[in-house]
Amino acid sequence: MPYTQQDIDKLKRIRVSGARSVTFSDGRQVVYNTPAEIDGAIAAAEAEVSQATDGRSTFASYSRD
């Protein structure tokens, strides 16, 4: 199952909190042994999500009239 932005956010939260396990949006549960493993998972997930969107992002733009 492909990663989602929600999965990336979860990985980043566990990295900061010091937790070692995460349950992804598709129900997979993973336990990481080291912070480096979490960093690798974050990088892989970000690359996958970026590739899925062809590297394009959308953003809102506002201007004062």
Image: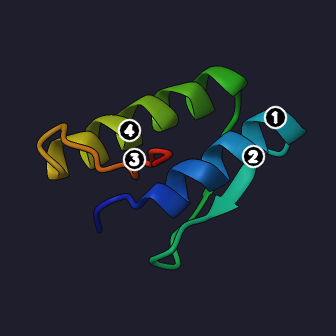
Label 3 element class: loop
Q: Amino acid at mark 2?
A: Arg
Q: Amino acid at mark 1?
A: Val
Q: Position of residue 4 (x, y in %)?
A: 40, 61
Label 1 element class: helix
Q: Position of residue 28 (x, y in %)?
A: 51, 71
- Check if mark 1's residue and mark 4's residue have beta carbons within 8 Å: no
Alpha-carbon neighbours of circle 2 within 10 Å: few (<14), some, or many (≥20)?
Answer: few
Specify which label sits upstream in the sequence, 2 or 4: 2
Indicate which label's residue lies in the foreground, 3 or 1. Answer: 3
Q: Which mark is residue 16?
A: 1
12 relative to 40, above or below:
below
How far, Cα to Cα, is label 1 from label 2? 5 Å
Q: Amino acid at mark 3?
A: Ser
Label 4 element class: helix
Q: Residue at x 50, y 45 (%)?
A: 64
- Check if mark 3's residue and mark 4's residue have beta carbons within 8 Å: no
Q: Which colour style is shown?
A: rainbow
Q: Which residue is mark 3?
A: 61
Look at the image and tell me whether residue 31 can be seen. Answer: no
Specify which label sits upstream in the sequence, 3 or 4: 4
- Check if mark 1's residue and mark 2's residue have beta carbons within 8 Å: yes
25 relative to 16, above or below:
below
55 or 46: which is nearer to us? 55
Residue that extends furthest to the top in the rendered view of this protein: 36
How far, Cα to Cα, is label 3 from label 4? 24 Å
How far, Cα to Cα, is label 1 from label 4? 17 Å
Specify which label sits upstream in the sequence, 1 or 4: 1
Q: Quadrant of residue 15?
A: top right
Q: Position of residue 14 (x, y in %)?
A: 76, 45
